[in-house]
Image: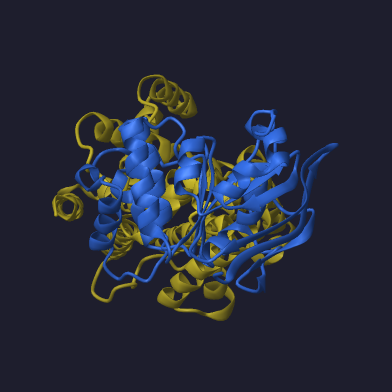
Chain colours: A yellow, B blue
Amino acid sequence: MKVWILHVAVLLALLVLLLVLPAYHATNLARIMVLAVFAIGYNLAFGYTGLLSLGHALFFAAGVYGAALPVTYLGFAQLPALIAGLVAGAVMAGLTGLLALRTAGVSFMIVTLMFAQAGYLSLLYFGEVTGGDEGLVLPGAAGLIPGLSADAARTTIAYGLFALALIASLLLVRGRFGRTMVAMRENEERSRMLGYNPFAVKLAALVLSGLFAGASGAAYALLFGYAGASFATIQYSILPMLWVLMGGAGTVLGPLIGTAAMFYLVDIAGSYTTATLLFVGVALVLLILFAPRGILGTIRERWLPWLP
Amino acid sequence: MAAVILSARALTRHFGGLRAVDGVDFDLHQGDIHALIGPNGAGKTTFVGLLSGRIPAQSGTITLAGEDITRLPAHARVRKGIAYTFQITSVYPRLSVFDNVALAVQQGTDRDLGPAVMAALSRVNLADRAEQTAGTLSYGHQRLLEMGMGLALRPRILILDEPTQGLASGEIANFKALIRSLVPETTVLLIEHNMDVVMDLATRITVLNLGQHLATGTAAEIRANPAVQDAYLGGHHAAD
């Protein structure tokens, strides 16, 4: 019960923040919430199932282009485009998983990285369609919700998507499949001897993870009006890992906390220097040294063992 | 004699030059408590590894109630009713005792996990520890949890690899009572070094030596078998 109270309270607090914050920060928060959906997806694979992927940029970009291409070339409306994007993310994760999950550990990292790089290079190669580095400009958030300004529509949709993703991930990890994913992370051989097919479980987890990543990518492209090959670069594979590590791998709220913390770390550092990645690096070193379980992971370990 | 539920024919597995299991024929009868004994290195663990699917067979066949399962992966054999408990206790140390057993129970058809998990925990006397983290249990309790997970799968065949290793004598008595309560619904195959447990519990005994089948019979027959005495029980014939 207190688990639900906490998560509903977090969603209400976000709603209040969106209403009272000045426009600049409200837009930041919309961006954070959309990217946190990506982090939630990454957390399902990495935090809960133990799949350390370096290829999630491919699933995010599949969402970006899965939405942007139909809008640009087929005249899709925004909602069907969002659905096309999240399906594209899940399908891409499924195809990648079918091959990459034949490996594990370091090999899995390398194979997923290679797939993502191949995806990035393909986007550049087919630059006439994808826009390559310059990308495609989309209509953006104006008119998405009749009667609302672009900013208001953007924050509303970002909030709705995030709330859905958070509740879905909470239901998932507290349910039977969540227990199965954690079991696979903790002891694969034991799980096999309880009748679980490791390949099938990991593939399902990766597809779910890709679904969230695709939804995030599609929403990001649609709400902020831009799709580009830069979303498929390795940076977008590393970022969700950093967000999840910072917030706490294997915690439901960790991805949101990590994404927000990293976002504002870069934002604040950016007002003093252009070397913002230095701050990110220092923060990570401190985190690994003093709180390897991340912010929420540490809180769970020390004070709140009931946190999901 | 009860029907054969699991059988192996000419089952073979070599590791390089080591003939760990070498052409073994074996029948497991429904409702038996069947003990597998033999000196160290006789191939017992490899043999049950082949039966459970953890180790792929090199040649030979394994049939479960008439169905050829030789090429079936381990997780599919578990779903067909062959449960395996590890020689070195293998629970999920960071999960609760409840979650450990729930992972087995949720493979079944129970709609409501809670009562089914608690029932499985009661059978191994761990119901009052459901919320505890499994890694903090004593060794004996972890062995019981391991058994509880195997039982919660409601297997037709339960394979136990040295289940009494490291248990205190009081715990062994409880273990024997537990095993007796399982048959005849569940058929039990156990590897066991404790001869008191074997002679007391087993309705049938198979002796392996150097990867080969040496003898199968009741406790009395095995005691009287000169080949077994040579290989295992002492080296001197009873008649000497």
Residue under the image location 31 percent in, 65 percent down: A157
**In the rendered image of this protein, does residue A13 appear above or below residue B108?**
above
Query: Farthest residue in the front direction?
Result: B239
* Quadrant hosting residue B93: top left
User: In the figure, is residue A21 to the left or right of B171?
Assistant: left
Residue under the image location 64 percent in, 58 percent down: A96
Q: Quadrant of the N terminus of chain A?
A: bottom left
Residue under the image location 41 percent in, 19 percent down: A289
Q: Residue A144: horizontal and vertical position, in percent?
A: 34, 72
Counting every numbered tag in the picture gives 0
State whether residue A49 appears in this view.
no
Q: Depth check: A61 or B2 in front?
A: B2
Q: Depth check: A109 or B227 in front?
A: B227
Q: Residue A95: horizontal and vertical position, in percent?
A: 64, 63
User: In the figure, is residue B119 to the left or right of B144?
Assistant: left
Residue under the image location 47 percent in, 57 percent down: A209
Q: Residue A41: horizontal and vertical position, in percent?
A: 43, 54
Q: Residue A293: horizontal and vertical position, in percent?
A: 37, 31
User: In the figure, is residue B114 to the left or right of B225?
Assistant: left
Q: Depth check: A111 or B212 in front?
A: B212
State whether residue B106 appears in this view.
yes
* Quadrant hosting residue B53: bottom right
**In the rendered image of this protein, does residue A173 appear above or below residue A69?**
above
Q: Depth check: A2 or B102 in front?
A: B102
